[in-house]
Structures are given as C-alpha cells and as structure tokens.
Amino acid sequence: MTQTTPTATITFSDGRREAIELPVMEGSMGPDVIDTRGLGQHGLFAYDPGFVSTASCASGITYIDGDAGLLYYRGYPIEQLAEHSDFMEVASLLINGELPTASEKEAFVGTVKRHMLLHDLMSNFYRGFRRDAHPMAVMVGVVGAMSAFYRDSSDAFDPAQREVAAYRLLAKVPTIAAWSYKYNIGQPFMYPQNRFGYAENFLYMLHATPCEDYRPNPVLARALDRILVLHADHEQNASTSTVRVAGSSGANPFACIAAGIASLWGPLHGGANEATLQMLEEIGDVSRIGEYINRAKDKTDAFRLMGFGHRVYKNMDPRAAIMRQTCHEVLDELGLNDDPLFKLARKLEKIALEDEYFIQKRLYPNVDFYSGIVMRAMGIPNSMFTAIFALARTAGWIAQWQEMISVEHRIARPRQLYVGPGRRDFVPIEQRG
C-alpha cells in the first residue's frame, strides 16, 4: 500500500491568490516540518526573525525536546553519556555517528593526542595581541589562522582532508585556548603531554609551569570532562548555525570554526556562565539576595538573573542536574562548601526552585549556573569560561559542518521582507534641500 505524503494548505483571505499546498516532512522524533521551499515559485517567502519556527536543515546528530527536558546525542540520552562515557568517546560518537569499539576509541584518542601540538610558528601570533586581550578574541584569530599553516587539510570538498582537519581542530583548540590564558598572565606556554587525557591535558597546559611537576587532580579532570560532554553539541543554536552558514560557501574548516567561536562569544550564548559569576559577584552577600530577587521580578528593572531559564528548555535543563551533582563533588573535593560566593549561589538556587514566580515562569537553574561555579572552584578565571565552552562545542561544530557538506550542501541565502524606500531618482547634491 502506497503511503501518501501529508500536506498543509495555505489559503488567502483576500482571494487574490489560489491556495498553496505544501508537503509536510516527518522526522524520526519531534514536531513535523512544513516544507516551504516551494513558496518562492508563488512569489512568497516565510518570515521568521531569529528562525525560531524554521528548520534550516535536516540533521541526524542532536535531538532536543525543550518541553520534556530531553537532550540526545545520536539517539543517546545525555544523562547516560555523562555517567558512563567521556568526552573523547562522545566526540567520536558525534563525528562518526556511532559509539566506538574499544579499538576504535584507542585509535581515535591516539590520533587526537598526536595532533595536539601547534605549528611552532603559530606561537608568534600570540605576541601580536595585547596581554589583556580576551581569550576568545585570541582564539578567533589563532583558529582562523590555522588555515595558513595547514593548507593540506583546508579543502572542504575533499573527504580525506575533512577528516584530517577534524582531528586537527579537535586536538589543537585546547592548546590554543590554554595558550591564550598563559599569554594573558605572562607565563610560558606549556606543551601538551601524551601521558594525559584530553581534559587532563587542558588543565596541565592551563595551570602548570616549568618550575615544578604538575599532576591534574583526577576529580577536577573528571568534572571538566563532564562539562565538555554536556556542552559538546546543542542542535541548531546560533554558533552551530554560523558554522553551517559559513561552511555552506565552501569556506575552509578552520575559518568555519573561527566563525562559530566568534558567535559563541556573545553574552546571550556562550558567555552566559561568565555573566552568571559576574552577577553573583555583584550581589555579593546572602543578605542582598531578596533585593535582587525583587529586582528580577520587576518588569521595569533592567536587571536579569543570569543562569536561570533557557531559550529552548521549558522544563529543567537535563544538563543542569548532572552539573549540579558535579558541582557538589568539586566543592567537596576542594573543601569549598563554606566559600561565601558558593553559599550565595546555593541560597539563590534554593529560592529559585521554591519561589512560585520562578516556578510559574519555569526559570529553573540551567547548566550555565552550575558550570560557572564549578570552573571558578577549579581555579579557572571567568575570562576562560567561554573558551572552555568553545573547545567542548568544537566536537559538535565539526560533526555539523561535516554533515552539512556531505549530506545536503547548498549555499545559505536567506531572503528578506524589504521595508525600505521605494524606487527613487538620484538628485545632484546642489539640488538637495
């Protein structure tokens, strides 16, 4: 029996146009999608600022159900991956489509480790920045410059070069990020060590000096690894869409990831965890929480509680509960449960989970609220929070970029609703009144 494709019909109340029938596409999970590609044939386009109701692509990588609070990587719930997996395994899953076997994972990890070193001349790029440059500014420049050093993996349309570029990006972004901080504080660059895992290596390059031996704390390394897992991909968000749009022109992979880093830098996107810590520092003391809660409820006040609520999740962010547990593990390990800032954060969390205003508006603590607290406890400065987000999201960006190039490659060209002046004739300057 032949199954008919469901359709949606657009009718026009003014009677000037005939009804338009459009096919409806069904995904394996989630809402159906009306295929509006045929609208152009009728002289019409869909209008959707921010693309909040538009599917820009078909993807098999990540699934989110914001109402139910679900996040799946390649069909695997984030809770299971965070508990049983690690970032290297998750990166392999995102990029290759399946969880690796033991031998496949060993080969994947080994290849990543061999690519963590930067070309020696790339260190010169750092000296061109001011010492107080934000690490994200440095990362945008240095990652983009990789295309000048790794031209043998810059052809987006060559599958072999794409694979090499994927390994290089995944491996070198932690080194680039850590070095941006070392340059900030005037310390010598530390080179990655093949004896360490991915998260351990980043902590080593961030905190070690040539003066003494440094061994990353395994509890902190595991916490950082979990942060990377939770942030590895998040469907078609602003930075991922930026990577896809840049890549649709055939731009080299290093330029595409640099574009994603630039987009992630925004305070409404990857900068949220940094903004959360700044908010806690502004509140300053438990005694002032009531004042700031009232300000958050006041629609005429520009103050907003950072780290609460989410654009997509209308239920509890599934990553938040995992990050909350990790937060307690780190604070216990470091003996920081009595730290004033962390006590303030816990009090604020308790109020938000019990206050009827926050419950009705579904303003639950999100993953940024907890991850900022964890990273601060680990001695990571606020300016590096978004950089760590970037190195986590690089895995997802690579997967999304590869899918875009190989599955449904078409250059992005959004249309617009023009609201400017109609046709006008040029008037010479001496005749303009």
Image (cartoon, helix red, strand yellow):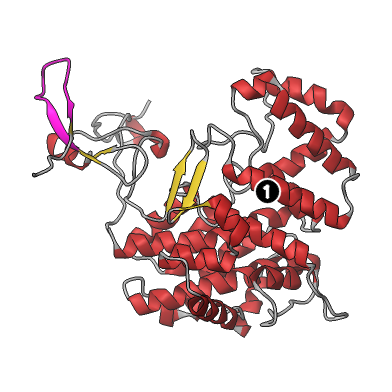
Residue in view at x 36 percent, y 71 percent: 156
Residue 35, horizontal then vertical, whole percent: 23, 40
The verdict on residue 119 being magenta is no
Q: How many marks?
A: 1
Residue position marked by numbered label 1 in the rendering: 323
**Residue that protrudes farthest toward the front in the picture:** 1
- Between 82 and 206, the residue placed more toward the observer is 82
**Residue that protrudes farthest toward the top in the picture:** 14
State the image quarter where residue 414 is shown: top left
Residue in view at x 27 percent, y 36 percent: 426
Rendered view: 288 above or below 367: above
- Between 106 and 418, the residue placed more toward the observer is 106
Which quarter of the rendered picture does the C terminus lie within? top left
Residue 392, horizontal then vertical, whole percent: 58, 60
Classify residue 185 as left or right of residue 35.
right
What amino acid is found at the position of numbered circle 1 in the picture? Answer: Met
Classify residue 344 as left or right of residue 86.
right
Residue in view at x 57 percent, y 74 percent: 171
Q: Which residues are magenta?
A: 8-23
Crowding near the residue tagged with mark 1, few <14, some 14–19, many ≥20 C-alpha atoms within 10 Å: many
Residue in view at x 63 percent, y 64 percent: 138
Residue 234 in view here: yes
